[in-house]
Amino acid sequence: MSDDYRGWPHLMCSGFGCDKKALMSYDVIYSFLKKLPDKIGMQAMGLPIVYKVRPEDHPDIGITGVTIIATSHISIHTFPKGQKDGKKKPRGIQRRIFQPFFTFDCYSCKNFDVDLVYDELKKVFKPKHIETALVYRLREDEELIEVEDY
């Protein structure tokens, strides 16, 4: 492996206070999932799979979609109405999920430009706040835990 190998990047993001129309648009989600692989140097294995979630199945979810790439996947779930349980008034950090938001995931066993992904998410969904986690899987310095035989 090369000296700059850090592991396989797994980017997880949640964007809050987003453009509600973008989160509700099948075409916007489809286009985003179709164009992103090329923009970050990945090869899509087919067209995006995108579903509008029926309100009777889950009233808070808008659209969910995934693109399978040669090196893993890119997925997004949108919540154009936020999530409201009606039982208690949201406090502190919980308030974020009461505004339109998305959750996003990009995992690949090939490096990609994380900043470019952030830029695309911001451009398309216009979040007021974005929360991210970047994990590198299969790192060389990772401690392995042995699993006992059955």
Image: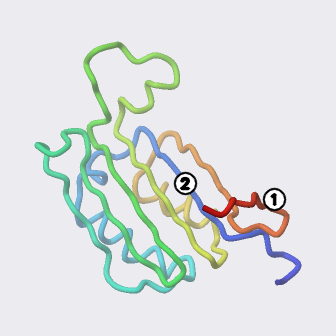
Which is more N-terminal, label 1 or label 2? 2
Residue 80 figure quarter: top left
- SS at mark 2 in the image: strand
The alpha-carbon separation of the residues under discs 2 and 1 comes to 22 Å
| Residue projecting furthest to the right | 3
Position of 121 relative to 87 (above/below) = below
| Residue annotated with mark 2 | 12
**In this rendering, would 139 be left or right of 29?**
right
Indicate the colouring scheme: rainbow
Q: Nearer the viewer, residue 12 or 139?
A: 139
In-image side of 33 versus 145 (left or right): left
Q: Residue at x 80, y 75 (%)?
A: 5
Residue type highlighted by circle 2:
Met
**In the image: residue 108, left or right of residue 4:** left
Q: Quadrant of residue 96?
A: top left
User: For mark 1, what is the residue?
Assistant: 143
Q: Is residue 113 above or below residue 150?
A: below
Q: Position of residue 30 (x, y in %)?
A: 29, 69
Q: Residues within 10 Å of mark 2 (few under 14, many from 20)?
A: some
Q: Residue at x 32, y 72 (%)?
A: 31
